[in-house]
Amino acid sequence: MMDVRIGVTYTAKELDVELPSGSETAEIKAQVEAALTGGAGSVLWLTDHKGRQVGVPVEKIAYVDIGSSSAERRIGFAGS
């Protein structure tokens, strides 16, 4: 699976959307760029691995982080 994290303006939390396996980074980037160039009133829509749709108004997007599955991330404390 692929994770997309979206920072939303005026909030400390970010949205974390797990996309289905087989999602392509280039395709997601194109989706984000198309929504952002759509101007005010545009919405970035993503469909997660369970089929739920998540929409974020583009004027509220602070950043978008496209990354690999959370299974590849380390959790806990690492020694120096």
Image (cartoon, helix red, strand yellow):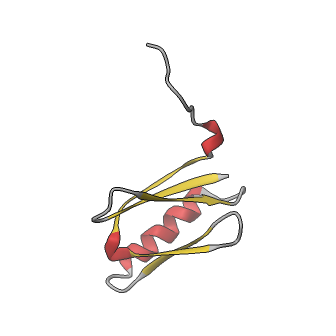
Residue 8 position by quadrant: bottom left
- Identified at 32% across, 62% down, the residue is 11
Q: Position of residue 65 (x, y in %)?
A: 45, 53
- Identified at 63% across, 58% down, the residue is 24
Q: Is residue 27 above or below residue 56?
A: above
- Identified at 33% across, 56% down, the residue is 12
Q: Position of residue 71 (x, y in %)?
A: 65, 40
Would residue 73 be found to the left or right of residue 23 on screen? Answer: left
On-image quarter of the C terminus: top left
Q: Position of residue 64 (x, y in %)?
A: 42, 58
Total marks shown come to: 0
Would residue 71 be found to the left or right of residue 64 on screen? Answer: right
Residue 34 position by quadrant: bottom left
Q: Is residue 67 above or below residue 64?
A: above
User: Residue farthest to the bottom?
Assistant: 41
Frontmost residue, 34 versus 52: 52
